[in-house]
Amino acid sequence: MQIPTLETDRLILRAHTLNDMDAFAAFYASDHSRFVGGPLTRELAWRSMAQEMGHWALRGFGRWAVALKDSNEWIGIAGLWYPEGFPEHELGWDIAEAHTRKGYASEAGRAARAYAYDTLGWDTVISLVADGNDASAAVATKLGARLDGPFTHERFGPMNVYRHPGPGDLDDSDGSVEAYA
């Protein structure tokens, strides 16, 4: 399966590679991953990375590795997600703690949402935010999403559904998405 590459002003959203494993495992070993299934051992993080790639094969879309454009350094994951047990197509982002508060999550989220609407033809997308994950709720709000109600996830427990504006209601004309490759 060919995974497209997206570029923004500062980021590259690309397929995960084994070269990302050390940074991926470090993210999932940290307490910062607590809202997204962590902390995990390195072995379980490897399985999580394989799951990310498998989602692309099974659904035809997925979450990209997020890398800094100037260095190709892996800084997180962002993209489109719809595993069994989720209520709808989701837009999500997981950024390593050293790279938070720099606008990377919203930049990557905006690019992934544009891909969902412009390339995949979706007319809606949600973000599921775990209770207490105020930083992720702030990103969803910055992207224009509004609280739409509760959802209880089988493993993660109580979550909040944030509904993003539809494609006709967006103004993503800030030049954040430069190219699809």
Image (cartoon, grey):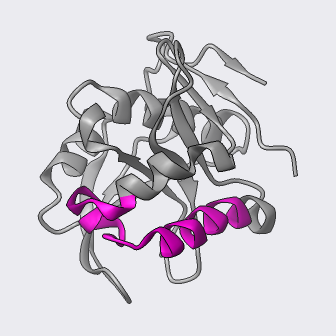
Residue 129 seen in render: no
Which range is magenta? Answer: 28-55
Task: Please state the horizontal and vertical placement of residue 80, each as a whole percent of the image.
Answer: 57, 52
Q: Position of residue 158 (x, y in %)?
A: 22, 79
**Nearer-the-camera pick, 98 or 139:** 98
Check the picture and name the quadrant holding the C terminus: top right
The residue at the far bottom in this view is: 154
Q: Quadrant of residue 160?
A: bottom left
| Main secondary-structure element of the magenta-colored stretch | helix
Foreground of the two, 59 or 155: 155
Outermost residue to the right:
1
Task: Give the quarter of the image for residue 138.
Answer: top left
Q: Residue at x 71, y 31 (%)?
A: 5
Seen at 72% across and 45% down, the residue is: 120
Q: Is residue 42 magenta?
A: yes
180, above or below 136, in the image: above
